[in-house]
Image (spheres, rainbow, N blue to C red):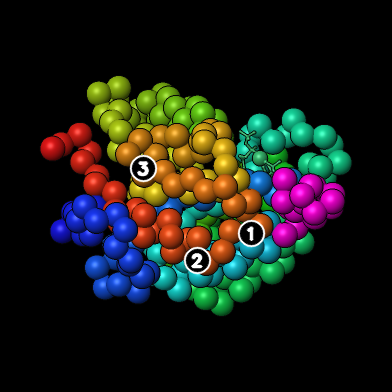
Amino acid sequence: MAIGKLFGADKSAKISIDDERIVMPEHIGVIMDGNGRWAKSRGLPRKVGHAQGAKNFRKIALYAKSLGVKNITFYAFSTENWKRPQDEVNALMDIFDENLDDFDEFIKEKVRMQFVGDISKFRPSIVQKMHRLEDASKEFTTMTLGLAVNYGGRDEIVHAMKLISQDIEQGKLTKEQITEEEIGKRLYTYPCPDVDLIIRPSGELRLSNFLIWQSAYAEYYFTNINWPDFSKKDLDDAIIEFNRRNRRFGGV
Ligand code: IPE
Ligand code: IPE
Ligand code: MG
């Protein structure tokens, strides 16, 4: 049955995440925004918000797995975030470095880890930890957990175009063989399917260069809650709302 038709026109019908009719999105994207405002509203330095946000990432990622989500990608650091004050960028790098040591909890849960973006720009200790986690989890199939770091949707498309022109130069591909599928195969998120639900907390109503190719037909869910306060119940609500949407993909 098509998503959205499930609960009919009655928008007020109470539905629980355990309802057997609930369809999980194939791939959820989460923009972890609002760490700074979360800290500011408590009179704390922004980096405390980032540390709290990282903690929440681990909680929500494991919860998604328990719900049976197959693919989820969290936006942690954009190609544009380098323009923040140096001390904030340094604090974020320290938080990544420290948190990566705790990501073995995902390995224990048989979660495949994928770092989405140009990770070569990070300090060597971070790059090594990311490679180790990807390597140790590459055979796992329960859920793919993406962390978008030094990620930009436009940068990703430029990167894919470079790979395509390289393949053409080397005679592995012809111009006629360039298709959406061939481009998709060269994105950082490959082999994850397109995102079908994008969640953005903190009240901002924009994509900020996140998964711009993959979200062509995504459903969007916005909430005013800042990321460190985003709860399991908030993820339930987003998935339930996704199930109310009537997705037409250009059809009728
Ligand atoms: C998101 O929180 C984390 C990163 C972009 C690294 P912000 O730091 O953007 O928080 P706000 O938007 O300033 O509240
Ligand atoms: C988007 O948040 C990037 C991440 C959450 C990692 P930003 O806070 O950087 O986005 P803008 O600046 O509000 O668009
Ligand atoms: Mg922000």
Q: Which residue is mark 3?
A: 218
Q: Earlier in the sequence, mark 2 or mark 3?
A: 3
Residue at x-position 72% and y-position 51%: 38
Residue at 36% of width from left, 44% of height from top? 219
Label 2, ligand 1: CB separation under 8 Å: no
Q: Which residues are magenta?
A: 37-52
Q: Which residue is mark 1?
A: 229
Residue 138 location in percent, x, y? 49, 63
Circle on res. 211: none
Give the structural element (helix, strand or loop) at label 2: helix
> What's the residue type where badge 1 is placed?
Asp
Estimate the spatial distance between the alpha carbons at disc 1 and disc 3, rounded to whole Å.
24 Å
Instruction: Classify mark 3: helix, strand or loop.
Output: loop
Disc 2 marks a residue whose amino acid type is Lys
Mark 1 lies on a secondary structure that is helix
Q: Nearer the viewer, residue 64 or 122?
A: 64
Mark seen at residue 233: 2
Pointer 1: residues within 10 angstroms few (<14), some, or many (20+)?
A: some
Q: Main secondary structure of the magenta part?
A: helix
Picture coordinates of residue 155 (x, y %)?
Answer: 54, 30
Q: Is residue 39 left or right of residue 212?
A: right
Residue displayed at 60% across by 45% down: 202
